[in-house]
Amino acid sequence: MTNFKTISHIIEPQLVVEGAGVLLRRSVSPRASNEHDPFLLFDHFAFNNPLEGPLRGFPMHPHRGIETVTYILDGSVNHRDSLGNAGVIGPGDVQWMTSGRGILHEEMPRRGESGNIYGFQLWVNLPAAQKMGQPRYQEVNSSTIPTIEKDGATIRLVAGELDGIRGPVTEIAASPLYLDVKLAPGSKFIYPIPSGYTALAYVFEGAGEFANEVVESVSMVVFNRDGDQLEVKSDSGVRFMLIAGAPFKEPIVPYGPFVMNTAEEIQQTIADLRNGTFIK
């Protein structure tokens, strides 16, 4: 028997300023309560108001104990890091960074031909056994992300599997699902998500019926962990990011760009930064 997921609650994103004066819509932020385990943060960035002034971006800053996922829809982000990596993420591209024991990196946005920059950043936790692992990147060009047309849905498969097709981002500790889903008017989308998984849907265009409740953009839908199927319908069309993964069920201590398991590990991280041993 099909058991559809139900909605726990809906989050209205809050405006926050991060980096060097970057205005963001934030739905999820790192908390010790860890209610969205294994997901820690979700930001929606759009530098589309001339009153915001120049794009200052995110100058060189550290991370430890997490993975960061940057997904660009419009514009681009120039990046470089302490490992010697550098490049540009453009429309439809994804950068999945595993910070492990420590990395310093910089992300500087640039407007596209439309004059806009638009995209998302997701933070995914690392389990205790991998928090001090080797940093690495997976840079995914837009052309390598499978696009699947199915029953009025257009699905970009960044991570996870659909109809035997796998997304290009692999070997991630949380084995997450990360989809960009666009439903045409009058269509329906059903996707299996195991019971017990954390599941989130960030609605950023249009409106849809999620678990029999109408949700309008811009909103983050948080589902209960019951049920094993997600159902979305839309009369007028909707677009959303679908995020899901199995929780690690470990305690966390977040502190700015660091997420570790104990306060002592955070203290050691700060000490490593101060004494020059953060990067190896």
Image: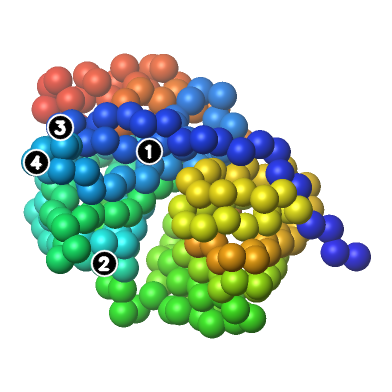
Label 2 packing within 10 angstroms: few (<14), some (14-19), many (20+)? some
The amino acid at mark 1 is Arg
* Cβ–Cβ under 8 Å for marks 3 and 1: no
218 in relation to 164, above or below = above
- Assign a secondary structure to mark 4: loop
Label 1 packing within 10 angstroms: few (<14), some (14-19), many (20+)? some
Query: Residue tagged by mark 4?
Result: 54
Name which of mark 2 and mark 3 comes first in the sequence. Answer: 3
Q: Where is residue 163 in the image (x, y as percent from the top left)?
A: 62, 80
Q: Which mark is residue 91?
A: 2
Q: Residue furthest right?
A: 1
Distance from the alpha carbon under mark 2 to that under mark 3: 23 Å
Q: Closer to the camera: disc 4 or disc 2?
A: 4
73 in relation to 225, above or below = below
Q: Position of residue 214 (x, y in %)?
A: 67, 50
The amino acid at mark 2 is Pro
Q: Which mark is residue 231?
A: none
Query: Residue tagged by mark 3?
Result: 20
Name the quadrant of the N terminus.
Answer: bottom right
